[in-house]
């Protein structure tokens, strides 16, 4: 039996002792106020045993990690039709690059870059009765936690400086790949990104991706085929233009966010989340990536 607790504790003491923790994202002003020395890690396995270390139960802004949850809800509701409006190829570009969108006639490369996530947000706005409320309820149900909420200060902060997202949404609209108003879609998108969650809550919400589409309560939300698609997208597109590096070093499907969170799954075995707000040059949590690399090295478990 692998001693997960011992491994998580020793990774935490290694990581907190590292001086260069990366740089906090400041382009969303509210994110700049975070304490850079925070570090947390949480794991839940298929038998619902959990292990954690550090600041694993503290709330942080999940940002782009939310793109996997909106994709799951949209795929569950609308099915394969969503692939007519968004592709499934890695972009090899930063998350907010717009050039490919012009080259490829308004079809975003994948649902985990901003333009693709905006199309998914548009699909949810079209299909949900009360989009923000219903998406929040979906995340709460997945995680079995009614306390999860948006951080409206973070959402408002991003709205003020979200010029690139406005540009992306307007480009999509110009190619007729947004059904709803730019403002409405962006309001939904800024809120999904502002979700405040802990490492523990993230592992609960992502449990279904390692458990064949069933959440911790045993409810089926996605088919096995849909989970395959989402995990494949996390592996190939989940880390901006560093997805190859993450697959190479860590070997798990996962998703990062500029709030410093990372969540990853080993299907059939466990779901793990880390949080350390300092980012590397590609926008992924510096210590989070290191921690997960150490974790899969120590456990000798990965999808490969
Ligand atoms: N809300 C952020 C943005 O759109 C998300 C970025 C991220 O976490 O990758 O810029």
Image: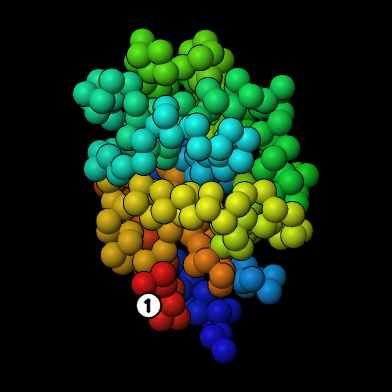
Count the labels in the image: 1
Q: Report the residue that reaches farthest toward the bottom.
A: 1
- Secondary structure, mark 1, is helix
- Residue 95 coordinates in the image, percent (x, y): 34, 36
Note whether 7 is above or below 155 in the view shown.
below
Q: Which residue, given by chain and number where applicable, does mark 1 sit on?
A: 297
Determine whether the beta carbon of the residue marked 1 sits less than 8 angstroms from the nearest atom of ligand 1: no
Left or right? Give the position of 211 relative to 30. Answer: right
Q: Can residue 190 be seen by looking at this rendering?
A: no
Note whether 185 is above or below 8 in the view shown.
above
Q: Residue at x 71, y 23 (%)?
A: 130
Q: Nearer the viewer, residue 35 or 10?
A: 10
Q: Residue at x 27, y 56 (%)?
A: 244
Which quadrant is home to the C terminus? bottom left
Give the quarter of the image for residue 152: top right
Which quadrant is home to the N terminus? bottom right
The 10 Å Cα crowd at callout 1, few under 14, some 14 to 19, many 20 or more, is: some
Q: How is the image coloured?
A: rainbow
- Residue 72 coordinates in the image, percent (x, y): 57, 43
- Residue 44 coordinates in the image, percent (x, y): 62, 68
Q: Nearer the viewer, residue 77 or 16?
A: 77
Q: Residue at x 72, y 22 (%)?
A: 129
Q: Residue at x 43, y 34 (%)?
A: 83
- Residue 168 coordinates in the image, percent (x, y): 36, 20
Q: Nearer the viewer, residue 95 or 286?
A: 95
Q: Can residue 91 be seen by looking at this rendering?
A: yes
Left or right? Give the position of 14 relative to 216. Answer: left
């Amino acid at each position: 039996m692998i001693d997960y607790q011992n491994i998580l504790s020793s990774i935490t003491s290694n990581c907190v002792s590292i001086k260069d923790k990366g740089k906090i994202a400041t382009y969303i002003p509210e994110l700049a106020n975070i304490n850079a020395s925070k570090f947390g890690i949480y794991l839940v396995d298929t038998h619902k045993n959990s292990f954690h270390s550090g600041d694993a139960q503290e709330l942080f802004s999940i940002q782009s990690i939310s793109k996997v949850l909106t994709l799951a809800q949209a795929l569950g509701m609308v099915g394969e039709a969503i692939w007519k409006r968004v592709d499934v190829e890695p972009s090899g570009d930063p998350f907010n690059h717009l050039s490919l969108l012009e080259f490829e006639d308004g079809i975003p490369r994948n649902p985990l870059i901003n333009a693709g996530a905006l199309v998914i947000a548009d699909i949810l706005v079209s299909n949900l009765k009360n989009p923000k409320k219903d998406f929040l309820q979906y995340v709460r149900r997945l995680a079995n936690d009614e306390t999860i909420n948006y951080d409206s200060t973070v959402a408002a902060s991003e709205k003020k400086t979200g010029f690139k997202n406005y540009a992306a949404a307007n480009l999509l609209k110009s190619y007729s790949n947004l059904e709803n108003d730019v403002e409405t879609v962006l309001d939904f998108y800024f809120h999904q990104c502002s979700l405040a969650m802990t490492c523990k809550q993230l592992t609960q919400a992502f449990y279904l991706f390692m458990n064949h589409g069933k959440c911790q309560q045993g409810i089926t939300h996605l088919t096995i085929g849909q989970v395959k698609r989402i995990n494949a997208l996390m592996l190939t597109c989940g880390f901006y233009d560093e997805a190859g590096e993450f697959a190479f070093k860590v070997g798990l499907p996962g998703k990062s966010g500029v709030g410093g969170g990372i969540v990853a799954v080993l299907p059939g075995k466990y779901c793990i989340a880390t949080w350390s707000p300092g980012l590397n040059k590609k926008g992924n949590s510096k210590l989070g990536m290191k921690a997960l690399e150490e974790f899969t090295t120590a456990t000798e478990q990965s999808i490969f």
